[in-house]
Image (tube, rainbow, N blue to C red):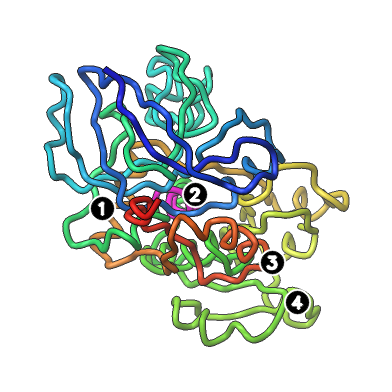
Amino acid sequence: MTINVLGYAAKTAKANLEPYHFERRDPRPNDVVIDILYCGVCHSDLHHVNGDWSTLYPVVPGHEIIGRVVRVGAQVTRFKVGDAVGVGCMVDSCQHCNPCEHGLEQYCEEGATLTYNSLDRHDQMPTFGGYSDKIVVSDKFVLHIPDAMELKSAAPLLCAGITTWSPLRHWQVKEGSKVAVVGLGGLGHMAIKLAKGLGAQVTLFTRSAGKEADAQRLGVDKIVISQDESQMASVKGQFDLIIDTVPYVHDLNAYIPTLSLSGTIVLVGYLGDLEPTLNTAPLVMGRKSVAGSVIGGIAETQEMLDFCGQHGITSDVEIINIQDIDKAYQRMLKSDVKYRFVIDMASLKNQ
């Protein structure tokens, strides 16, 4: 028997989101059924709603999901009814390719099954996301939330958190590492918190002044105005890793000279062509790299959640009702949020 669910969906490109009744699958023996309490709002949600990326309509967005277990399948042993759990950007993968066997399900060679805007690899039903009251997920893709963690502030960890944690771990950031973050938004503020938690010295690159107090509150050691040539010159050759969170076309050439020998700038916020042309001379002459990264595997995501629980790290959030999601999208486009909207899914009951 399928499960009747109420959510919010965009039925066509650029449409306002509206109440939408749909069905979740009959739970399988390895499934966990979750009542959704909170769901974070990601730029990806807006891109899918607007049709900027290939979208299956109607689309129910949301892949920063926090909830409680209300039912478990007969084969599930890791979770019990009442557990606080999370679901991130993917809900399945092939489980047998090389990336999957190494805990890198996000790079599944057959393509990971995304939490929304995807097709279930077993029954071909469309996946619908966390802007809804319930979700059914394979236990392998469900995450434990640490006991002491504030649930509403944990939701963005499932995307913004792991998106910045994964490169920090891959490039082995540790005590004394010198890390810079480009952009102070949903991703940027998490990159700062996590890098500081790992013991790094953290610099913020920003285009405009006026962010000093907030950046320092988040743990930044230094702020560099990227439009100021003298300030950029003052940090030449300093950074082991730069995490670039900017979600639109921008010039990377100004940042490359600030990398140390063998340093890397990793893009986590922008998908598309780079403009203007990247000058490779400083890359070749300093063994520097431009790289990309996307979320993390399930084991790495659990590692990040456990680390955040131990260090008291969560996202800075503004709680909204689901009825205000379209207004939140417009504010998000103006960077008018510090630093992540989170939907209180109890507001669905007001329909």
Disc number lying in front (1 or 3): 1
Q: Amino acid at mark 1?
A: Asp
Magenta span includes 164: yes
Residue 11 place in picture, x, y as percent: 61, 36
What residue does disc 4 label?
Answer: 233
Residue bearing mark 2: 163
* Mark seen at residue 258: 3
Disc nearer the start of the sequence (1/2):
2
Q: From what the image shows, is residue 119 above or below residue 284? A: above
Verify CB contact (< 8 Å) between mark 1 and mark 2.
no
Question: How far apart are labels 2 and 3 at the CA level?
Answer: 23 Å
Crowd class of label 3 (few under 14; some 14 to 19; many from 20; radius 10 Å): many
Placement of the N terminus among the 4 image quadrants: top left
State left or right for residue 159 relative to residue 13. left
Task: Provide the residue designation for mark 1.
Answer: 306
Q: Residue at x 39, y 39 (%)?
A: 6
Q: Which residues are magenta?
A: 158-165
Q: Quadrant of residue 261?
A: bottom right
| Amino acid residing under circle 3 | Thr
Looking at the image, is mark 2 or mark 3 earlier in the sequence?
A: 2
Q: Nearer the viewer, residue 324 or 230?
A: 324
Q: Amino acid at mark 2?
A: Thr
